Image (cartoon, helix red, strand yellow):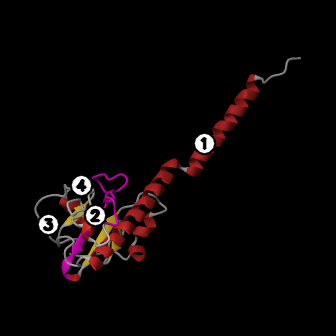
Amino acid sequence: MKKGFTLLELLIVIGILAILAAVVVVVLNPAQLLAQARDSQRVSDLASLNSALNLYMSDVTPLSYGVDTTCYASAAISLATCQARHSTKTLPAGGVTNVARVVNGTGWMPVDFTGISSGSPLPTLPADPTNDTASLFYSYSTKTASSTFELNAVFESTKYKPMMLNSKDGGNKDNVYETGTQPGLDI
């Protein structure tokens, strides 16, 4: 008698493996895991920017880190798109096109972090992991008279989206994660 597997046994094993693979894909949802990883990076980046801006304001000057009524973004977007995120009331001419990541004040965020006495806490300005022009970009606006600023991002994953609610981040937009010295900054 020969030993081996019959065609039926092989088909049953292949079927079971296919079902297990499908269950693993559905349960783990790789797309959602990747979105969560990008959202985690967004939280980390905004925390780093927030700390760097606070250090800049305490060490250099609280009044020279941006222009009121202007929105700065890490992606080349329209100014109206950026300002809609920040609830700004004035729309200066031009668009947000400077997406350089340098920290000397000529990058997408017009803050010269190299002016800090201990040097720049950031090697480069962070950019959103996808940095697209629709909604996934970082943005910054300031109100120099009150020495306040706001940093924004939008999350993708269902795990992080609740953090964008006003009750969670203190801002004024439910679909945007707002942080800074005054989340919900209204210029």
- Return the residue nearer the eye: 1 or 55: 55
Task: Give the image quarter of residue 61.
Answer: bottom left
Please tell me how crowded label 4 is: few (under 14), some (14-19), or many (20+) other residues with Cα within 10 Å.
some
Residue at mark 2: 139
Image coordinates for residue 21, horizontal then vertical, percent:
62, 41
Q: Are marks 1 and 3 in contact (CB under 8 Å)?
A: no
Residue at mark 3: 91
Please tell me how crowded label 2 is: few (under 14), some (14-19), or many (20+) other residues with Cα within 10 Å.
many
Residue 137 part of the magenta-drawn span: yes
Image coordinates for residue 159, horizontal then vertical, percent:
49, 62
Report how far apart the C-alphas of labels 3 and 4 lie in the structure.
19 Å
- Return the residue nearer the eye: 172 or 69: 69
Q: Earlier in the sequence, mark 1 or mark 3?
A: 1
Which kind of residue does numbered mark 1 sit on? Ala
Q: Nearer the viewer, mark 2 or mark 1?
A: 2
Which kind of residue does numbered mark 4 sit on? Val
Q: Is residue 186 above or below residue 94?
A: below
Which kind of residue does numbered mark 3 sit on? Leu
Q: Earlier in the sequence, mark 3 or mark 2?
A: 3
Q: Earlier in the sequence, mark 3 or mark 4?
A: 3
Residue at mark 4: 99
Report how far apart the C-alphas of labels 2 and 1 lie in the structure.
39 Å
Residue at mark 1: 22
